[in-house]
Amino acid sequence: MTVTAEGLRIELMESEKGTFFESGRPEPTTSGRELMITIAHEIGKLPNKISLEGHTDARPYAGLANYSNWELSTDRANASRRLMMQNGLREDQVVEVRGFADQRLRNPQNPDDASNRRISLIVRYLEKNGQAAPAPITDAKQ
């Protein structure tokens, strides 16, 4: 977890053994589902808005033609959103779903590292009136 300009970022990172997704698959594993459901129950109690991001490592997707890490990262973020909305996140709570493929590597020194494959939940800051603060416009490079 880290505090960012947008809010509290919770990163669910892969390991070499997997954890949240099978390689090249958008559906969460059993252990990934369990953790996301637990998190959704807790975050659903908060008034904050949520953004979800999907990230991949730099290995090219080797599955279907016309399907790349862009689609995979977005599909994983959307699969996470659907699961979490079925298990605690409110209908009005999710405000963004973003897929970044390999463009925001957690470990840029090792682009194929498992930690680059992750789902990020951003619990966005509240404004003084209790509404979620808008996401700041930032340069795509981080």
Image: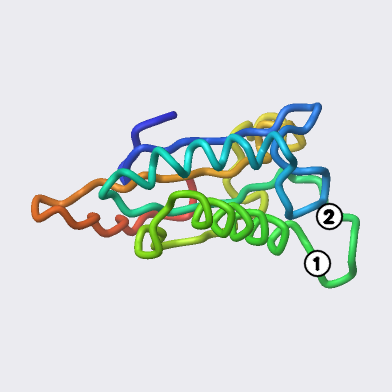
Residue 49 is tagged as none
Q: Is residue 95 left or right of residue 102?
A: left
Left or right of residue 97, residue 68 in this image: right
Dot 2 corresponds to which residue? 61
- Reading the image, the residue beneath label 1 is 67
Q: Quadrant of the N terminus?
A: top left
Of residues 103 and 16, the one drawn nearer to the viewer in this rendering: 16
Residue placed most toward the observer, 135 or 21: 21
Q: Residue at x 66, y 38 (%)?
A: 32
**Can you say whether 11 is above or below 24 in the image?**
above
The residue under the point 31% across, 56% down is 135
Q: Are marks 1 and 2 in contact (CB under 8 Å)?
A: yes
Looking at the image, residue 102 sits to the left or right of residue 134; the answer is right
Residue 99 falls left or right of residue 136: right
In what element is the residue under mark 1? Answer: loop
Q: Is residue 137 above or below residue 104?
A: below
- Hey, which residue is sitting farthest bottom in the picture? 66
Image position, residue 101 (x, y; %): 66, 54
Tell me the amino acid under the disc marked 2: Tyr
Q: Quadrant of residue 61?
A: bottom right
Task: Give the spatial CA distance, label 1 vs label 2.
Answer: 7 Å
At 69% across and 61% down in the image, what residue appears?
A: 70
Packing grade of label 1 (10 A; few <14, some 14-19, many >=20) is: few
How would you rate the neighbour count of disc 2 (Cα within 10 Å): few for under 14, some for 14-19, many for 20 or more? some
